[in-house]
């Protein structure tokens, strides 16, 4: 009698009634489960296992385990469960386009004196990915903080070693210390802001916001920087344009994008803010006449700390977090941010925000 027959034909009535329950539990489990008999043929599996391992080859039942998953340590673990009655855990990595990683627990089981082994596959792909992202983030943060800190310490030492009495240079050294301390301050502000947004800490207060006035306000705030870089700011949004957004967060998105458009522009360049309406979506366009962004970088600039030129971004006071913040804020609005760019000609960042039809009908 096979393990499955034993399972489904329990003789005692209380066993019989528990079997449908077991079968339902298997079905409901998110983890993939595979049960094999002594000959390592699959006797039972659940839908999750089918989704993970079937690869269009039909049902898993009756196939050998080795036909379904090719992995030596997994087979060894099943063998140990069957022959030596020993439970074990193995890590299983499935290569391919959709690489997946599992933490598998394999244990011997027995029904009505029929032996078998069960494998429970915990998908740890996402956990591993998150762990990697966390590690990368920590290492990035440490690196970003260490650079200005090293500079501060070096200049403090120089002052201590006598430069404090050097009337020609001491103010300049203090200036460098101040600049680096401010950089650290910005960085910590941006990290806190990003983690606040990512943790779902903010609730948007969306209403109709006049985009023309909002753009003017951001232009005013950035006017001295624009002057410093000799950049012309053009507001091409009509005075009657309203978007459905959280005013504070919209200002933050515009500030980050316009600030970049100024910083990465060419001398005497222009930054233009425009607006388009497409079906259900409002699109805010921030266009610059700067150096542009090459295709290899284009995909990645919204990642945290990603910069096309790290040293240059730092020099002009960047933290590498501005675009990541914009991306999260746009998504919180149910929208998205994207970019198109022509090298040597300039870039256009677009914030898409869904329209609020209810508001317009009123
Ligand atoms: P940063 O603090 O460096 O500005 P961001 O996240 O705002 O960080 O931008 C990431 C990187 O994307 C920048 O360092 C720069 O390399 C590139 N970038 C952003 N905006 C522009 C732009 N308008 N033109 C060219 N490159 C840009």
Image (cartoon, grey):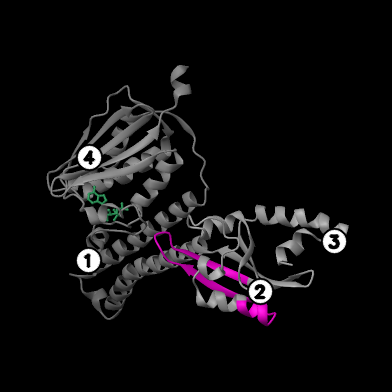
* Marks 2 and 1, the one that precedes in the sequence: 2
* Marks 3 and 2, the one that precedes in the sequence: 3
* Marks 4 and 1, the one that precedes in the sequence: 1
Q: Which residue is mark 3?
A: 11
Q: Which residue is mark 2?
A: 38
Q: Which residue is mark 1?
A: 172
- Write down the region rendered in magenta: 79-105
Q: Is residue 8 left or right of residue 238?
A: right
In magenta segment, residue 335: no
* Marks 3 and 1, the one that precedes in the sequence: 3
Do we see residue 225 in this rendering? Answer: no
Q: Nearer the viewer, mark 3 or mark 1?
A: 3
Q: Secondary structure at mark 4?
A: strand
Q: Which residue is mark 4?
A: 287
Q: Is residue 30 left or right of residue 190?
A: right
Q: Position of residue 53 (x, y in %)?
A: 52, 60
């Amino acid at each position: 009698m096979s393990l499955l027959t034993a399972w489904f034909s329990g003789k005692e009535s209380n066993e019989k009634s528990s079997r449908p329950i077991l079968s339902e539990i298997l079905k409901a489990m998110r983890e993939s489960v595979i049960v094999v008999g002594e000959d390592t043929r699959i006797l039972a599996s659940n839908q999750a296992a089918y989704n993970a391992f079937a690869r269009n080859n039909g049902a898993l039942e009756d196939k050998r385990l080795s036909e379904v998953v090719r992995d030596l340590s997994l087979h060894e673990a099943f063998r140990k469960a069957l022959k030596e009655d020993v439970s074990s855990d193995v890590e299983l990595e499935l290569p391919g386009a959709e690489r997946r990683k599992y933490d598998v627990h394999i244990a011997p089981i027995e029904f009505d004196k029929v032996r078998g082994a069960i494998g429970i596959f915990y998908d740890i792909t996402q956990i591993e990915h998150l762990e990697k992202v966390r590690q990368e983030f920590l290492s990035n943060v440490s690196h970003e903080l260490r650079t200005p800190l090293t500079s501060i310490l070096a200049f403090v030492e120089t002052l201590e070693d006598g430069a404090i009495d050097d009337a020609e240079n001491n103010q300049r050294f203090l200036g460098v210390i101040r600049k680096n301390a401010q950089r650290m301050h910005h960085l910590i502000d941006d990290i806190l802001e990003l983690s606040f947004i990512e943790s779902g800490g903010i609730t948007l207060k969306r209403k109709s916001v006049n985009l023309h006035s909002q753009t003017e306000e951001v232009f005013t705030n950035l006017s001295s920087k624009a002057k410093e870089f000799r950049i012309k700011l053009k507001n091409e949004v009509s005075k009657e344009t309203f978007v459905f957004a959280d005013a504070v967060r919209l200002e933050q998105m515009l500030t980050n994008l316009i600030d970049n458009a100024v910083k990465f522009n060419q001398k005497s360049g222009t930054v233009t803010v425009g607006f388009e309406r497409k079906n259900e979506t409002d699109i805010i366009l921030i266009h610059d006449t700067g150096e542009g962004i090459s295709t290899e970088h284009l995909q990645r600039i919204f990642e945290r700390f990603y910069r096309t030129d790290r040293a240059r971004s730092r020099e002009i006071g960047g933290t590498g977090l501005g675009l990541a913040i914009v991306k999260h804020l746009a998504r919180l609005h149910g929208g998205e941010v994207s970019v198109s760019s022509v090298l040597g000609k300039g870039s256009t960042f677009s914030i898409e925000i869904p329209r609020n039809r209810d508001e317009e009908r009123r």
